[in-house]
Each structure stands twice: as structure tokens, then as C-alpha cells.
Image (cartoon, helix red, strand yellow):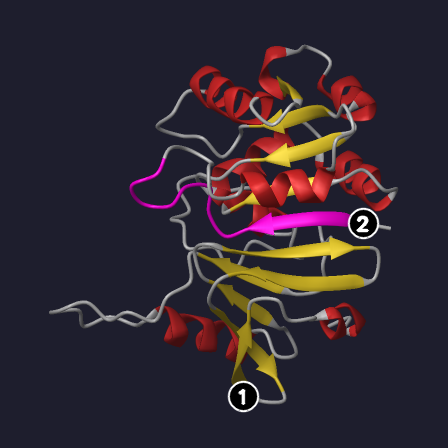
């Protein structure tokens, strides 16, 4: 069964990279000597080398060994031998396109469904959904399809907020997600604010972090979900 930790974001304003999430990662993975495969393919302005180094430093501080997949020739073998798969944020379209270019989607999906823990933030959380249609990113490249790992039967919108900026005439995030539901009836979306995450252990799904997430498409209303809530009912929905 899948073991997932899907984070809205990696870094809170004014804090070093990946500090707020460390306690949640350690609680999720435990003290086992994990061999982590990091996938930096969402990086665009940051180089894969720099991204891999930053993540390696953050996870080594927690006691975990990290190998960035861009550093090896046999990427499928690295995934096969990894005891945890970590996918970073950045641009979701670039991430998905590169995953297909390297023929890794089905392998990662099978590996995670067989029990290997998966950690993803921002674009990495989008990748765990059925599609990437609820990302916030611009389509800077065109992947062959929007279909993603389908590790959960609902969509996530990371970095969720309902702000309307002064002078803004365009749609809010809420209005965009309502458009998605009109054109994709039956789907569910979790609007996941920064500092929050979704954790799956077998058939138990929990919303973590401080704050309130939003659930779209359930019983025809937008519902508040507080951190600490059991949201396992979302796993029973195959739409």
C-alpha cells in the first residue's frame, strides 16, 4: 500500500530551505537508513546540481542518504534500489515532461504502490495526483499528456490561497478551481495552503500542519478541513 507525504511547499518565508517540514519527514520515515532517490526535474532556474546538493544537505541533516537521479546513467536502476523517492517542486510541466522523456512514470508508480515511501512538495505533490491540471504553473513545455502518477484519487492545489490583490481583475484561485470542476465533473480538489501536507499510510489519509485546507467538489460545496483531520474518505472516491 502507498506511503505518501505530500507537502504544499518546501520553505516558509524567512526560514532556511526545507526546515519547517523536517520534523514531519522524520516522523514519516523514521530512523531507518533510507537510500533516497531525489528527482530534481521540476527545477528550471535552479540547476539540477544545485537542487540536488540543497536537498542532499537538508536530508543528510536528518540522517538520510540522497542520490539525485540526474547524476546516474541508469536512472531506472536507482529507482529500483531506492528505499524512498523524493520529488521536488518547481515547474510541474517541466517535471512531468522530463519524467516521460526518461520513461519513469510507470516505474515510479509501481514502486510506490508496492510500498516504497514517496515524498513530494509543490510540483512533486501535483505529480502524485491523477493529472497535473490543478498546478499553479505556466505550461513552459508541453508534456505528452497531463496524466501523472495517480497515487491518490483526487487533485491537489499547492500554495493555496484565496487572496485577490489590489488592482487584480482576473480570477482568484478559488474561481480557477471552480472552473476546473465545471470542466472535469466528479473530480475532487484539496486546496493545500503553505505549511500543510497530506500523509497517507495504507488506507489512512491525514491532513497535517497548522491551518485550514479547502475541499472542492465534495457534496457540491467548498468545505473547510482543519489540520489533524482524517480525510480517508477521499480514498474511496474513484472519480
Residue 125: x percent and y percent? 58, 49
Q: Is residue 223 left or right of residue 86?
A: left
Residue 130 vs 183, above or below: the answer is above
Quarter of the rendering containing residue 102: top right
Residue 210 vs 47, above or below: the answer is below
Q: Is residue 225 left or right of residue 118?
A: left
Image mark for residue 85: none
Q: Is residue 177 left or right of residue 116?
A: left
Give the Cα separation between the discs numbered 1 and 2: 28 Å
Q: Say whether disc 1 or disc 2 marks the residue closer to the N-terminus.
A: 2
Please tell me whether mark 2 sits on a helix, a strand or a loop. Answer: loop
Q: Which residue is mark 1?
A: 221
Q: What residue is at 66 percent from the left and 65 percent from the top?
A: 154
Residue 86: x percent and y percent? 63, 34
Q: Which residue is mark 2?
A: 2
Residue 144 visible in the shown view: no
Residue 86 vs 1, above or below: the answer is above
Q: What residue is at 56 percent from the left and 53 percent from the top?
A: 132
Q: What residue is at 42 percent from the left and 56 percent from the top?
A: 159
The span picked out in magenta is: 2-15
Q: What residue is at 48 percent from the left and 39 percent from the top?
A: 89
Please tell me whether mark 1 sits on a helix, a strand or a loop. Answer: strand
> Is residue 6 found inside the magenta-colored segment of the image?
yes
Amino acid at each position: 500500500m502507498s506511503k505518501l507525504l505530500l507537502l504544499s511547499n518546501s520553505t516558509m518565508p524567512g526560514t532556511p530551505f526545507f526546515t519547517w517540514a523536517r520534523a514531519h519527514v522524520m516522523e514519516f520515515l523514521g530512523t531507518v537508513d533510507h537510500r533516497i532517490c531525489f528527482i530534481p526535474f521540476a527545477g528550471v532556474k535552479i540547476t539540477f546540481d544545485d537542487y540536488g546538493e540543497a536537498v542532499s544537505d537538508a536530508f543528510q541533516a536528518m540522517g538520510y542518504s540522497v542520490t539525485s537521479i540526474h547524476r546516474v546513467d541508469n536512472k531506472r536502476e536507482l529507482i529500483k534500489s531506492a528505499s524512498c523517492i523524493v520529488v521536488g517542486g518547481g515547474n510541474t510541466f517541466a517535471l512531468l515532461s522530463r519524467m516521460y522523456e526518461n520513461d519513469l512514470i510507470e516505474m515510479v508508480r509501481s514502486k510506490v504502490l508496492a510500498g516504497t515511501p514517496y515524498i513530494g512538495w509543490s510540483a512533486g505533490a501535483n505529480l502524485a495526483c491523477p493529472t497535473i491540471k490543478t498546478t499553479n504553473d505556466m505550461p513552459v513545455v508541453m508534456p505528452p499528456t497531463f496524466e501523472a502518477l495517480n497515487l491518490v484519487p483526487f487533485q491537489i492545489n499547492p500554495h493555496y490561497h484565496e487572496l485577490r490583490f489590489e488592482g487584480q481583475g482576473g480570477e482568484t484561485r478559488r474561481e480557477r478551481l471552480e472552473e476546473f470542476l465545471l470542466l472535469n465533473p466528479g473530480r475532487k480538489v484539496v486546496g493545500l495552503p503553505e505549511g500543510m501536507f497530506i500523509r497517507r499510510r495504507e488506507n489512512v489519509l491525514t491532513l497535517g500542519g497548522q491551518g485550514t485546507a479547502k475541499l472542492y467538489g465534495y457534496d457540491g460545496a467548498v468545505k473547510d478541513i482543519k489540520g489533524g483531520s482524517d480525510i480517508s474518505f477521499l480514498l474511496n472516491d474513484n472519480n
